Amino acid sequence: MEKVHFTEEKATNLGTLYGRALDARREDPILGDTAADEAVKKIDYDFRKLGVNENSAVSVAIRARAIDEMAAKWLAEHPDAIVVHLGCGMDTRVYRLDPPPSVAWFDVDYPEVIDIRGRIYPERPGYTAIGSSVTDFGWLDQVPGDREALVVAEGLTMYLTAESGTELVRRLVGKFRSGRVVADFFSSLGVRAQVVNPVVRRSGATLHWGIDDPHELERYGLRLVSCLDATDWANDETLAKIPTASRLALRASALFPMIRKMGRIAEWDF
């Protein structure tokens, strides 16, 4: 067993890991991330104190699956691309998508997160882990910029400040010749609602950056391609796997635009 102690926002990645593990244990999982379940079994940590249960695990799995599908579709058309997974946490996305060795995949997160990843997850061709805060921009020097790039950020933007987040966008756009960004984000209301988010509250983390209009990032070199409200993350196949209570909650949320737009996923080209 690996003893784990993360502080503040670093601990929230254990909440999403546990959510994916709980989903994998379901008879008909949404994401089916068995690697997440195996990782949870190897980590000496009381995951129950994070406040993640089977219901909240559904939203974790839906979000991850929606981002996976966007990333996989783009990678299918760009098999020689660079992938930069920002704030990767304990996510097993590189194993779920299983890109060919021609894809150069870089996971970026705090050194202590990368350390525990290295002790739990196996090495694979074309994969590099970088231990750094995503806003300590020196890590960009370790990534080549001569190819198209896919930048993926899940559960990250809301923990950045608006200043550091927009500077990160500027640096990424300046680094690569072209590419795509796939990221989820909260609205200003979503950030204010952090007091009712059990994972955020119990970890002691703080949310900062709310984005009310994804077009806002176009001033920093991006061009919006698509955007999904939280109630649109699940396609028909996924909806069929959602427990009745969660499905009814999604339908109810769809009736209120401010709630529906609290959490969104977007794609931008640059």
Image (tube, rainbow, N blue to C red):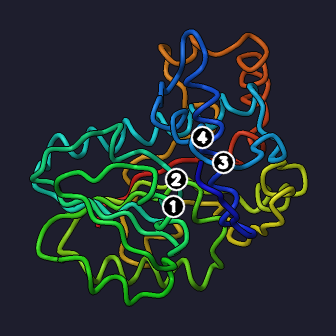
Q: Are marks 3 and 2 in contact (CB under 8 Å)?
A: no
Q: CA distance from mark 3 to mark 2?
A: 21 Å
The disc, 2 or 4, on the residue closer to the chain's N-terminal end is 4
Residue drawn at (49%, 22%), measured in percent from left and top? 235
Q: Within the image, what quadrant is residue 151 found in?
A: bottom left
Query: Given the image, on which type of amino acid does mark 4 rest?
Result: Val
The disc, 4 or 3, on the residue closer to the chain's N-terminal end is 4
Q: Are marks 1 and 2 in contact (CB under 8 Å)?
A: yes
| Residue beneath disc 4 | 40
The disc, 1 or 2, on the residue closer to the chain's N-terminal end is 2
Query: Given the image, on which type of amino acid does mark 2 rest?
Result: Met
Q: CA distance from mark 1 to mark 4?
A: 12 Å
Question: Dot 1: few (<14), some (14–19), or many (≥20) neighbours within 10 Å?
Answer: some
| Residue beneath disc 3 | 263
Q: Is residue 189 left or right of residue 92?
A: right
Q: Are marks 1 and 3 in contact (CB under 8 Å)?
A: no
The disc, 1 or 3, on the residue closer to the chain's N-terminal end is 1
